[in-house]
Image (cartoon, rainbow, N blue to C red):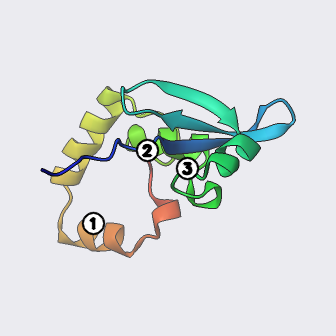
Amino acid sequence: MRTMMPAMPRGIFRERDGWGSQHSVQVRYEDGKQLGMSQADYEAKQYAPGFEYLPWKDDYEARLEGRTGRPRDPNQLAKSVVELATLDDEGLAALRRRKPDQRNDG
């Protein structure tokens, strides 16, 4: 018979000065609940991943929303798709040459 180890709570993201004057970590428990705790408590409990490997809250939320900048307006996104579909070969080549920070993110 194999014994299953209970899942350890896991850090989700870290937040600057989220616990008084100390950084904090949002932790997800096996039952799905999420609670915040200070960086010191998180490190003392040796939860994974290590504090320095957790994304900052802003980065985590951006990833959840599939963005790296401001929220996307669905109408603007649809307009962008239509514009992209109507580009000729020269326009597509120019778009591919642009750096990510030069692209319109919506």
Q: Residue at x 18, y 64 (%)?
A: 88
Q: Whole-Å distance between the Cαs marked 2 and 1?
A: 51 Å
**Could you say whether the residue bearing mark 1 is in a helix, strand or loop?**
helix
Q: Are marks 2 and 3 in contact (CB under 8 Å)?
A: yes
Which mark identifies residue 104? none
Name the foreground residue: 11 vs 65: 11
Q: Position of residue 97 (x, y in %)?
A: 38, 75
**Residue ranking furthest to the left:** 1
**Could you say whether the residue bearing mark 2 is in a helix, strand or loop?**
loop
Which mark identifies residue 47? 3
Residue named by callout 2? 8
Q: The disc labelled 2 sits on which kind of residue?
A: Met
Name the foreground residue: 25 vs 100: 25
For residue 49, above or below residue 97: above
Q: The disc labelled 3 sits on which kind of residue?
A: Tyr
**Label 2: few (<14), some or many (≥20) within 10 Å?**
few
Q: Residue at x 29, y 43 (%)?
A: 80
Residue named by callout 1? 91
Q: Position of residue 5 (x, y in %)?
A: 32, 47
Q: Work out whether mark 2 precedes mark 1 in sequence or the reverse, and give the earlier one.
A: 2
Q: Position of residue 41 (x, y in %)?
A: 71, 41
Name the foreground residue: 33 vs 64: 33
